[in-house]
Amino acid sequence: MRITKTTVSVLEKNKNVMEHMEFKTGDMVVYPTHGVGCVQGVETNEIAGLSLELVVIDFVRDRMTLRVPIAKAAESGLRCLVTEDVMKDALTRLKGRARVKRTMWSRRAQEYEAKINSGDPLSIAEVVRDLHRKVDQPDQSFSERQIYESALDRLAAELAAVEKIDTDRATEKLEELLMAA
């Protein structure tokens, strides 16, 4: 992911928001490398003689529980769900024309993985758009299909949480937008 002034200001703004964010049981949050999870609560644990306050996040889809120190939440990229406006921008990106670079697949795959793991729905939408294949286009390789499905799942999960719909319906909505583009 290329870091621009806009990206830096958004990250700084997000960091400032996270420093003041309160984690409440039931809140939906996004952890960049795992996607959307539900806050189960805040607990205090003693680790190596230090008392740490940890946010407990449950990722139902992955059957995983993550504990993030509150002091490191912003640094780790933990954030609230995006607003409906940001999600609309991400959905608009799906309608755009695919921008596939003419570089080696291994290099592009690394860039796509970095975009997915950034947790930014706009970047994830670009990956979905660029790797989506229409009926008349050639089939994808196994690794292309894996990255595409990973990005689609991640974007659908956040769309579902933002619009308060189930993940299957969110996936259908994304695929309809891709087909219409």
Image (cartoon, rainbow, N blue to C red):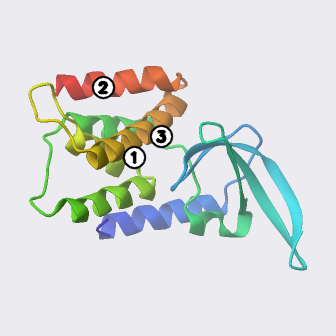
Residue found at x 51% / y 56%: 33
Q: Is residue 125 visible?
A: no
Give the residue pinned by disc 2: 175
Question: Outermost residue, bottom direction?
Answer: 49
| 136 is higher (above) or lower (below) than 3 | above
Tags 2 and 1 in contact by the CB under 8 Å rule?
Answer: no
Q: Position of residue 67 (x, y in %)?
A: 73, 57
Q: Amino acid at mark 2?
A: Glu
Q: Nearer the viewer, mark 2 or mark 1?
A: 2
Q: Amino acid at mark 1?
A: Pro
Give the residue pinned by disc 1: 121
* Quadrant occupied by the C terminus: top left
| 48 is higher (above) or lower (below) than 23 | below
Front residue of this view, candidates 89 and 154: 154
Give the residue pinned by disc 3: 83
Q: Secondary structure at mark 2?
A: helix
Residue found at x 31% / y 40%: 89
Tags 2 and 3 in contact by the CB under 8 Å rule?
Answer: no
Q: Amino acid at mark 3?
A: Thr
| 4 is higher (above) or lower (below) than 100 | below
* Quadrant occupied by the N terminus: bottom left
Residue found at x 40% / y 26%: 171
Please tell me how crowded label 3 is: few (under 14), some (14-19), or many (20+) other residues with Cα within 10 Å. Answer: few
Please tell me how crowded label 1 is: few (under 14), some (14-19), or many (20+) other residues with Cα within 10 Å. Answer: many
Of callouts 1 and 3, which one flags the residue occurring earlier in the amino acid sequence? 3
